Each structure stands twice: as C-alpha cells, then as structure tokens.
Image (cartoon, helix red, strand yellow):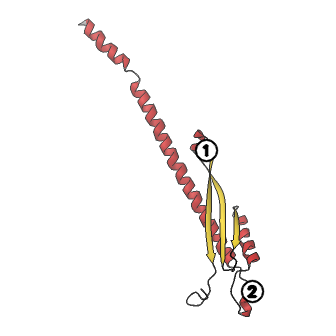
Amino acid sequence: MIFQHRGLGRGRLDDRGGVTVFVAVCVLALIGIIGVAVDGGGTMRATERADYIAGEAARAGGQAIDPAQAISGKAIVVDPHGAQAAAQAYLRSVGAAGAVGVSADGTTLTVTVDGSYTTKFLPVVGIGSMPVTGHATATLLHGVTAPEGN
C-alpha cells in the first residue's frame, strides 16, 4: 500500500507547474491579440482623421474662386494660387502636413495629408508608429438648382 501511494504522489509531482506554463502562454497570446486590435483600431481612427482633414482643406481651397473670370462671366474656376494657399493655411491651422494640387482646368482641387499613429502595444515588437495618409478631392460646382457647366 505504501508503494502505490508513492507512485501516485510522484506522478502528481511530475505535472506540477504544467498549467502555469499553459496559462502564461495563453495570457501572452491574448495580450498580443488585444494589442493588435487596439493599435489596428487606432491606425484606422488616425486614417479617418487624415481623410477628414484632407476633405476640409479641399473644401477650404475650393472656395477660392478666380474673381476676375467669375465677375466677367467667362468661367467659374478655382484660383490656383488662392486655392493652394487656403488649403495649406487650413492644414497649418490643424497642425497637419500635406500636399495640395489643382487640376489643369482649374475645377478640381486634390489634397493629400500625411501623418503617423503612435502605437500603444506594438513598440514591444519594435513598431513604434504606423504611417497614415488621407486623400480628398473637391470639384468646383456652381448653379442655382443643379450644377452647371459639367
């Protein structure tokens, strides 16, 4: 009877700590998954913000029409220099960096905003920040009940 008791006791001692290792591995995996979810969501929010800023800058620039052509009735087109200046001024006012371009025909303004998202969990694996980019285009439309000239 004593021999059987020692055999059972030794079997239990051999497995001691096995559950602890399993739990530690599972906890590390869960923390990794949570980290990827948090930083992935943060990157998406930063991209949405960059898109929003680009859209607002394009809207601000799109309001800069060429008064000489509009008053004379020749055309309603964007003043290229004024539009770029207005869009860049908006980008500066919100602390964003980006590029502004006007189409050759002067009816479309394109804004690209570049930024980055500082990660919260991923620095553990060497990823301190992730680049984000936002794009927007404003097309100059005019008319009383419907867009004219397009």
Going by the image, does 48 lie left or right of 67?
left
The alpha-carbon separation of the residues under discs 1 and 2 comes to 49 Å
| Residue that carries the numbered disc 1 in the rendered image | 127
Rendering quarter of residue 77: bottom right
Q: Residue at x 61, y 66 (%)?
A: 135
In the rendered image, which quarter contains the N terminus?
A: top left
Under circle 1, the secondary element is loop
Going by the image, does 102 lie left or right of 29?
right
Q: Which of the labelled discs sits on residue 92, or is there none?
A: none
In the rendered image, which quarter contains the C terminus?
A: bottom right
Q: Is residue 86 above or below residue 28?
A: below
Q: What is the crowding at mark 1: few (fewer than 14 residues within 10 Å), some, or many (at least 20)?
A: few
Q: Residue at x 58, y 46 (%)?
A: 120
Give the residue type at disc 2: Pro
Q: Position of residue 63 (x, y in %)?
A: 68, 79
Rendering quarter of residue 86: bottom right
| Residue that carries the numbered disc 2 in the rendered image | 67
